[in-house]
Amino acid sequence: MGDVSAGSLLLADTAGSVKQFVTVFIGVYVLLILVYVITSWIPGGASPTLERVRQFLYDVCEPYLRLFRRFIPPLGPIDLSPILAVFALYILGALVNALIDRLF
């Protein structure tokens, strides 16, 4: 009987850890998207370090943002895909955490 409760506690702890990982991952990715958007406003060639950071952010964020640009193309100089991408991440995070709650 003690093994069952220990297993339940371990499962609940694992579920909590997975939920926390999902929340932190989404928070970090949203922060990367925000920094990507802000660095896009700075003219190119400002500094070699900034260009390396910009390239990293491009490699990390652009594939995900491209998914949303298929549905909402940029409206002139305004690109709404980061806003939609952030909303989608938060919705996905809420769904995943709700699913974990239902499973455990």
Image (cartoon, grey):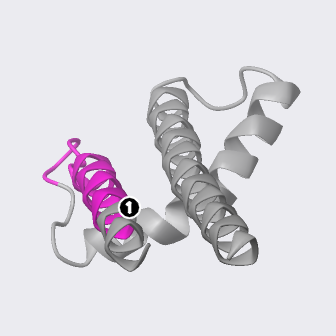
The answer to whether 42 is drawn above or below residue 78 in the figure is above
> Is residue 98 found left or right of 49 in the rendered image?
left
Instruction: Work out whether residue 98 or residue 93 is closer to the camera in this orientation and state it.
Output: 98
Q: Residues within 10 Å of mark 1 (few under 14, many from 20)?
A: some
Q: Looking at this rendering, what residue extends furthest in the front direction?
A: 1
Residue 84: x, y in percent? 22, 55
> Is residue 45 found left or right of 102 in the rendered image?
right
Image quadrant occupied by the N terminus: bottom right
> Is residue 32 found left or right of 77 in the rendered image?
right
| Dot 1 amino acid type | Asn
Residue 12: x, y in percent? 57, 62
Can residue 77 be found in the magenta stretch? yes
Can residue 34 be found in the magenta stretch? no
Instruction: Work out whether residue 74 or residue 23 is closer to the camera in this orientation and state it.
Output: 23
- Residue at point 38%, 61% (across, down): 97
- Residue at point 40%, 79% (across, down): 103
Residue 31: x, y in percent? 52, 35
The answer to whether 46 is drawn above or below residue 70 in the figure is above
Instruction: Please give the range of residues in magenta.
Output: 75-96
Magenta segment's dominant SS is: helix
- Residue at point 20%, 49% (across, down): 80
Image quadrant occupied by the C terminus: bottom left
Quadrant of residue 13 in the image?
Answer: bottom right
The answer to whether 72 is drawn above or below residue 21 in the figure is below
Determine which residue is flagged by label 1.
97
Residue 19: x, y in percent? 51, 56
> Is residue 52 found left or right of 61 in the rendered image?
right
How many discs appear? 1
